[in-house]
Image (cartoon, rainbow, N blue to C red):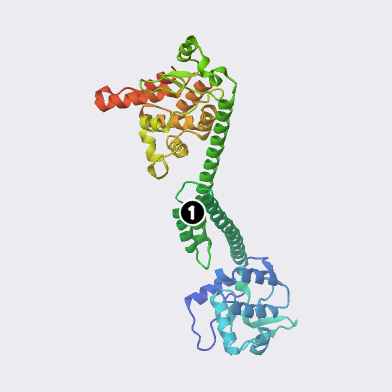
Amino acid sequence: MESESATTPFGRRPMSLAMLLKQRRGEAIAAGTTRNKWKLFRSVCEARAGLDVTDRALTVLDALLSFYPQDELSSEGGLVVFPSNMQLSLRARGMAAATLRRHLAVLVEAGLISRKDSPNGKRYIRRNREGGIGEAYGFSLAPLLARAAEIETIAARIAADRQMLRRMKERLTICRRDIAKLISAAIEEAVPGDWERIASTFQALLQGIPRAAKLEYLGPILDELETIRLGIINTLELQGKIQIASTNESQIEHHIQNSNPESPSESEPGLETGQEANRRCEPRPGLERREPGMAGEDGEGWRAIVRTHAGKLKSFPLGMVLQACPDIIDYGPGGTIASWRDLMMAAAVVRSMLGVSPSAYEEAASVMGPESAATVMACILQRGGHINSAGGYLRDLAQRAERSEFTLGPMLMALLRAKERFSDGPAHRPEIGTDLVQAASR
């Protein structure tokens, strides 16, 4: 300990309990503690905000350290410096005496130095017989050395916070740029979505960013912006998958329609015999029986199920699907479904709502075709309360379709018949989950 007695201030400056405690705490230096005075001063400058000192006060501390003869501050040697006001003012870049006294008081209040006043208030030393310093009066640097570990910890924390703030600002800049460009791309590509609302929300978040950015303010704003960016990316990716699937379906159907253009039944329809005409009206592989009054293009009372390849089916009319599965309409863009694209977007929403994994839905779309997969999701939603696992049910239908054991017609007709029977009264409502499975296997 530098001194065993408390030092009271000279003149009219009063003594306080806080001053006494700071003196005793500042002089309690662990044995063997040493620090390079200029490295420690850099740590003080780094931790300035946490120590509540001004930059002018640090200029005065720099001047005081320059009067200490060694580079190493040590508890073994005397830590009192005793410059005159004139010399201290010169080393403090010509600071005025009144300003100098004010910033010395700031350093004392911050607990970085302490006063050791002489009986007459002057700063001087009394040497011993060996020529060394026997007693010194001035400013003690003991509190600075005693708080060295604390100051270094504060400096390291502030430096880490500054680094984190810089990285967060970089992420914020990239996120702002991504959202602005993604919204522009979505509008230019006419992707369905409430882009005006998303853009207004985005602008409101940007206006909420404070000028003096801090970690506690930027963190929540960055989280919301990243959520918006992720939502836009998911919407655009879904739209891209729908367009690719629709393009592939159109190419496959176009190939089938153009295959075997020299067929005699198409090039010379007037030359077919009566036996051939009767055979044309019989059910063929790939055809299913229609209800009365729903004649298809391939013959009275029959509708063609054109298989593009294993399991892939041509969709039924959209109006028929919506008539059998009206619940899907609420999940379409704007609460309506006017096209197959709207139905596929609604099916993607329903898939997530029913807990069907993306892999199960993509597998069904690749096997059945995107339109048929969307139709199946509409059917599952229509009677979801009777199906224990929508994902497992969809996978089972996809496997049946791959083995050519599943068609959409019986499933839709079962729903239409169930709708008609249910309109007559609850007592006639079927167990539709079982009904769908049986119909799909026909």
| Figure quadrant of the N terminus | bottom right
Along the line of sight, the residue nearer the viewer: 7 or 287: 287
Along the line of sight, the residue nearer the viewer: 243 or 393: 243
Q: Is residue 29 above or below residue 317?
A: below
Along the line of sight, the residue nearer the viewer: 107 or 384: 384
Residue lying at the far front in this picture: please name it: 270
| Figure quadrant of the C terminus | top left
The residue sitting at 60% across, 63% down in the picture is 162
Q: Is residue 292 visible?
A: yes
The residue sitting at 65% across, 65% down in the picture is 31
Question: With 251 as the anchor, is 90 left or right in this view?
Answer: right
Q: Is residue 226 visible?
A: no
Q: How many marks?
A: 1
Q: Position of residue 396 (x, y in %)?
A: 48, 23
Identify the residue under disc 1.
224
Q: Position of residue 114 (x, y in %)?
A: 58, 78
Along the line of sight, the residue nearer the viewer: 253 or 59: 253
Q: Is residue 378 above or below residue 223?
A: above
Instruction: Tell me which corner region of the image, top left, top right, bottom left or bottom right, holds residue 168.
Output: bottom right
Q: Is residue 214 above or below residue 12?
A: above
Residue lying at the far right in this picture: please name it: 130
Q: What amino acid type should be assigned to the residue bearing mark 1?
A: Glu
For numbered disc 1, what is the local secondary structure? Answer: helix
Residue lying at the far top in this picture: please name it: 275
Instruction: Tell me which corner region of the image, top left, top right, bottom left or bottom right, holds residue 173.
Output: bottom right
> Badge 1: how crowded within 10 Å, few (<14), some, or many (20+)?
some
Question: With 63 as the anchor, is 385 left or right in this view?
Answer: left
Q: Position of residue 126 (x, y in %)?
A: 68, 85
The residue sitting at 53% across, 32% down in the picture is 362
Q: Position of residue 76 (x, y in %)?
A: 69, 71
